[in-house]
Amino acid sequence: METKEFNPFKMAQTQFDGVAKKLNLDEGSSDLLRNALREFHFSIPVRMDDGTHKVFRGFRVQHNDARGPSKGGIRFHPQETEDTVRALAMWMTWKCAVVDIPLGGGKGGVICDPHNLSMAEQEQICRGWARQMAKNVGPLNDVPAPDVMTSAQHMLWMLDEFEVIQGAKYPGFITGKPVGMGGSLGRTEATGYGLIYTVREALKEMNIDIKQTTASVQGFGNVAQFAIELYNEYGGKVVAVSCWDQNDQTSYTFKKNEGIKLAELRSVTDKFGGINKTKAEELGYEILDANMWIEQEVDILLPCAIENQVNGETIKNIKDSVKLIGEGANGPTTPEADAVIKEKGIFLIPDFLANAGGVTCSYFEQVQCNMNYYWEKKEVLEKLDTKMTHAFKAVSDLSRKRKEYMRDAAYIIAISRVAKACRDRGWV
């Protein structure tokens, strides 16, 4: 989230500006793409369980829809900011473009902490968000999805409210819904699995056997858990996980040299991905400072939490053993850290490629909803693997051909596609 020292939107614009220069992008296209097409800021009044009233602040940013309806999640977070949502919406535009799906970028959020809200209060926030945005979202113009601290249940409440307002069924309005209510099989696994598909392909290019690798992961939410699951299936070993402990109101790194056991850690994890420190200790985990995840002697680092985690300070602590960083989170690495990663020769899979599995499977969910025919899980994951592998190879090939950093190569492909769509439409 945004701090006084770190502004994710300024970082997203800085990344864009660098690539715009490489592409010799005209001034009109640059001005259009470095800012959002439209933004919505609104209040959501809620009657709390104790009878009092509280007003929550909500957002929706639609960055660009030249290639198709805006697409992006809705976050519930106490430190949500306008600039965080702006940055995430921009990154969603590039994410959809780099995997070549016909969608644009959007993002939403509400400033709230679900840890301290009952399900009834959360339902009111969801329905209030849908009421505020009902005229400006929908299957043909903007399709939301779950994100940090939101779930399939939240999406279903929003869908229900939207359909009540519209007076018709619109299962394609929102993705990440429960299976059986228009949701897609494989959607829960998609972002984490997609990350590991790209890690697998990167290791092949580096001539490294994934079975001989170790990894350290930041985060233990949906993305991290399924990334660990597939990485373990491929034979890799995760030795450390860093995440929040709700009881202590702080984060720790949970470590086992012989490798963490996913099932046992899941057994002491809450629905928000927070691991109970006391119970983890009882299971034999070493409890370290939160930032120790990045200081492990491993081959792979997987930041799967929030923005600004690999920065000018933390990058100094990365060990020489690290060969690859796969960005499961959005915006985890700052430009200052990118410079060091380049210097060290670490292979980087940029966020809007590495974690594009979620939006890709959301697109699959839209397709299934719109044709009212649903695929088996095996078919969904096969399609996801094909899409992610193809996108990774396109970026990697361009990176080698033009001797570009992987992040810049991914941006070149994504920005070129969006800029062309804007030009073809006559916008610039």
Image (tube, grey):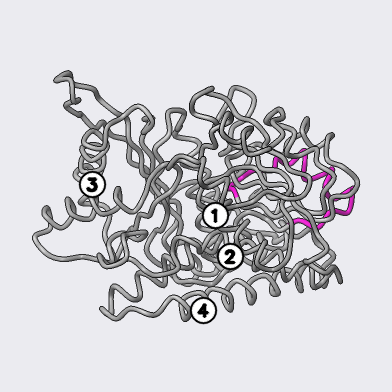
The residue furthest left is 167
Can residue 428 be seen in this snapshot?
no
As drawn, the label of residue 194 is 2
Local secondary structure at mark 4: helix
Q: Nearer the viewer, mark 3 or mark 1?
A: 3
* Disc 4/disc 2 C-alpha distance (Å): 11 Å
Q: For the residues carrying marks 3 and 4, which lies nearer the camera in this image?
A: 4
| Dot 4 amino acid type | Lys
Q: Residues within 10 Å of mark 2 (few under 14, many from 20)?
A: many
- Residue hosting label 4: 383
Residue position for label 1 = 28
* Label 3 crowd (10 A; few <14 / some 14-19 / many >=20): many
| Residue at numbered disc 3 | 130
Label 4 environment density (alpha carbons within 10 Å; few <14, some 14–19, many ≥20): some
For residue 51: magenta?
Answer: no
Q: Residue at x 78, y 30 (%)?
A: 313
- Residue 257 position, x and y percent, is 78, 45
